């Protein structure tokens, strides 16, 4: 870059940074590279699409598009998924946690060109599995308490979600409820901090009608699902039965009153006839 600038220091020139096929840069690497380039006063960082829009087309010249033989290897595909899980887990835990630094270092090691060699498939996959096992082992210590059913007194109420963590550090995540038939007056998601103990969080829900509703409960950080479960919410039929019973009771009282009045009239009629006789 310095050589290009010194050749024609007063001209605006475009260049593209391309990584070799055997190196997959991590998000942290790219961000650090961008920060370094931004510190140079005679450089401007732009997306390739923006760069192409600024270039003048050369009439009568057409370049063939590059062809990349083969498809992405299974290791690269799995590495992408593991990278996402590591970064999502790292965002959920404290910065000074040793396991966070260890996972990020392991991710950099997994991006080494030696693991990208198809001749070391077994060893490469085993290394990725070891990284995934660490994340699964930690997230398995955070559990949403399973509740088979929850009964509301009406169509509106509170759903309490209990979460237990046996980790020795807190995590920050998103707790989310999912059921399109149910509305959530205060929102269906909460940004929560799960402490190393029992934790409780309340959601306001409105079923809008009586019945049974299955609500999914998900605790997640980005695309990393820490734990999930589901519960059935039932609306109580007590209110409906109370209305029916009151209606029946009112009808019974009205019937008794009518019968007593009829009986009184019949009794009065008989006495009137006897007096005439």
Image: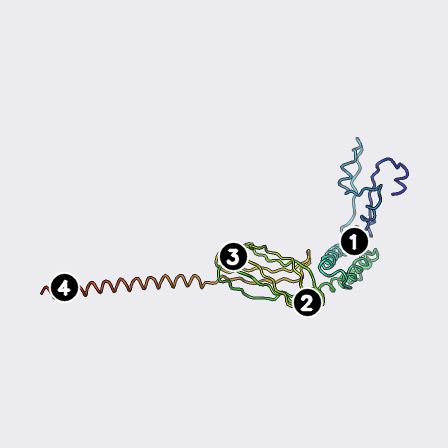
Q: CA distance from mark 3 to mark 2?
A: 33 Å
User: How many residues crowd around disc 2 within 10 Å: few (fewer than 14), some, or many (20 or more)?
Assistant: some
Closer to the N terminus: mark 4 or mark 1? 1
Left or right of 265: which side holds 90? right
Q: Quadrant of the N terminus?
A: top right
The mark lying in front, picked from 4 and 1, is: 4
Which residue is located at x 51 percent, y 62 percent?
152
CB contact under 8 Å: marks 3 and 2: no
Q: x%, y% of residue 137?
A: 71, 66
Left or right of 89: which side holds 21? right
Q: Which mark is residue 196?
A: 2
221 w.r.t. 49: above or below? below
Closer to the N terminus: mark 1 or mark 2? 1
**Tally of numbered discs:** 4
Q: Residue furthest left?
A: 277
Q: Quadrant of the C terminus?
A: bottom left
User: How many residues crowd around disc 4 within 10 Å: few (fewer than 14), some, or many (20 or more)?
Assistant: few
Closer to the N terminus: mark 3 or mark 2? 2
Query: Under tag 3, what secondary structure?
Result: loop
The residue tagged 1 is 28
Q: x%, y% of residue 142?
A: 67, 65
The residue tagged 4 is 272
CB contact under 8 Å: marks 1 and 2: no
Closer to the N terminus: mark 3 or mark 1? 1
Q: CA distance from mark 2 to mark 4?
A: 88 Å
The residue tagged 3 is 207
CB contact under 8 Å: marks 3 and 1: no
CB contact under 8 Å: marks 4 and 3: no
């Amino acid at each position: 870059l310095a050589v290009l600038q010194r050749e024609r220091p007063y001209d605006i020139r475009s260049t593209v940074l391309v990584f070799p096929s055997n190196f997959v840069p991590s998000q942290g690497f790219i961000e650090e590279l961008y920060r370094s380039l931004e510190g140079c006063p005679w450089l401007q960082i732009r997306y390739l699409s923006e760069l192409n829009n600024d270039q003048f087309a050369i009439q009568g010249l057409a370049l063939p598009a590059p062809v990349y033989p083969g498809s992405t290897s299974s290791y690269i595909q799995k590495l992408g998924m593991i990278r996402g899980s590591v970064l999502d887990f790292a965002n959920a835990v404290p910065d000074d946690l040793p396991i966070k630094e260890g996972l990020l270092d392991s991710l950099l090691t997994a991006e080494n060109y030696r693991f990208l060699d198809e001749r070391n498939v077994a060893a490469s996959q085993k290394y990725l599995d070891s990284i995934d096992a660490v994340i699964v082992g930690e997230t398995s210590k955070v559990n949403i308490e399973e509740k088979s059913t929850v009964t509301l007194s009406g169509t509106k109420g509170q759903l309490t979600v209990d979460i237990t963590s046996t980790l020795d550090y807190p995590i920050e995540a998103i707790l989310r409820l999912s059921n399109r038939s149910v509305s959530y007056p205060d929102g269906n998601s909460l940004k929560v901090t799960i402490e190393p103990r029992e934790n409780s969080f309340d959601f306001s829900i409105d079923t809008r009608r009586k019945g049974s509703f299955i609500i999914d409960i998900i605790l997640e950080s980005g695309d990393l699902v820490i734990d999930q479960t589901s519960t059935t919410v039932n609306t109580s039929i007590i209110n409906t039965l109370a209305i029916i019973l009151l209606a029946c009771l009112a009808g019974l009282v009205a019937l008794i009153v009518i019968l007593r009045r009829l009986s009184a009239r019949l009794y009065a009629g008989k006495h009137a006839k006897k007096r005439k006789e």
